[in-house]
Structure formats: C-alpha cells, structure tokens
Amino acid sequence: MDLRARLANNLARESAAYGFTLSVWGSGAMLIAEFGVPEAVEVFLFVAGAVGGFALLSALAFDGPFEARSTDTEDLRVASMVHVVATLGTLGVTYALTTLTNDGVPQVAVFAAAGLSIVVGYNLALLVEEITARRV
C-alpha cells in the first residue's frame, strides 16, 4: 500500500466537505457569539436558507430536479483543495451579516441570509479557486 497515494486520495475526496463543514460551523458559531443560542425558528430559518441555497445552485447546474448526471473525475490541483477563499470568505460574509441588526434588519433574517450565503458563496468560491489553480 502506497501511504502517500492513499493520503492524497483521502484529501482529494474530503476536500470540498472539510471546507464546507468549517464554513457552516464557523458561521454558526459567529451567529451564536453575536446573538446567543438561537431559538428554534432561527435554526429552521438558517437551515431553510441553506436548503434554498442548494435549490438555487441545483437549478443553475441541472436541467431538472430528476436529471441523472455523472460527476466528473478530473484531477484536482492541490492549491484548489485548500479552500482558503471559500472558507474564510464565507465566514467574512457571515460576520458582515451579523452587523446588519445594527441597521434594523431582524435577527431572524440574518440567520436565513447566513444559511443561504454559506451554501451559495462557498460553492461559487470553490469554482473560483479551481479555475485560479488551473491557470497558475
């Protein structure tokens, strides 16, 4: 068994998920730090925002809700696997959203917007990272 090849394979498979997990967890922690433990309605709105983000991106990526599509098996560039822009950018957006309550935006709207922005922002930033890594 080639341990280095196995490690590379593991990192490539886990790449998008680890950054996404850090984005969701980090954004949730920021919301809790700013507003305290969310009420049930805020949790549902955060998740509804995230589901809405997936629905929006799915509508852009697929022809219909029941379309069968194979994923690509292209090799990843190592630089496109680190997800600095996607993860930290998403956290930056969530941090900015937490300040909107100072301008009168309801806290529940911030939770919904955070959920939406994490999914949409993270996935779009992944595309930017991959394109950039391939051009460098």
Image (cartoon, rainbow, N blue to C red):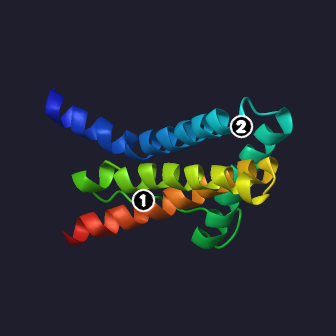
Residue pictured at 56% horizontal, 49% vertical:
95
* Mark 1 element type: helix
Whether residue 130 sits left or right of residue 36 in the image: it is left
Q: Position of residue 130 (x, y in %)?
A: 33, 63
User: In the rendered view of the protein, which quadrant contains the C terminus?
Assistant: bottom left
Residue named by callout 1: 126
Marks 2 and 1, how far apart in space?
29 Å
Residue named by callout 2: 35
Q: Residues within 10 Å of mark 2 (few under 14, many from 20)?
A: few
Whether residue 58 sits left or right of residue 75 in the image: it is right
In this view of the protein, which residue sits in the foreground, 64 or 108?
108
User: Is residue 106 something that shows in the picture?
Assistant: yes
Residue pictured at 69% horizontal, 60% vertical:
55
Task: From this view, report whether residue 73 is shown above or below residue 15.
Answer: below
First along the sequence among labels 2 and 1:
2
Tell me which amino acid carries mark 2. Answer: Phe
Q: Which residue is the extreme one toward the front?
A: 102
Q: Position of residue 116 (x, y in %)?
A: 66, 56
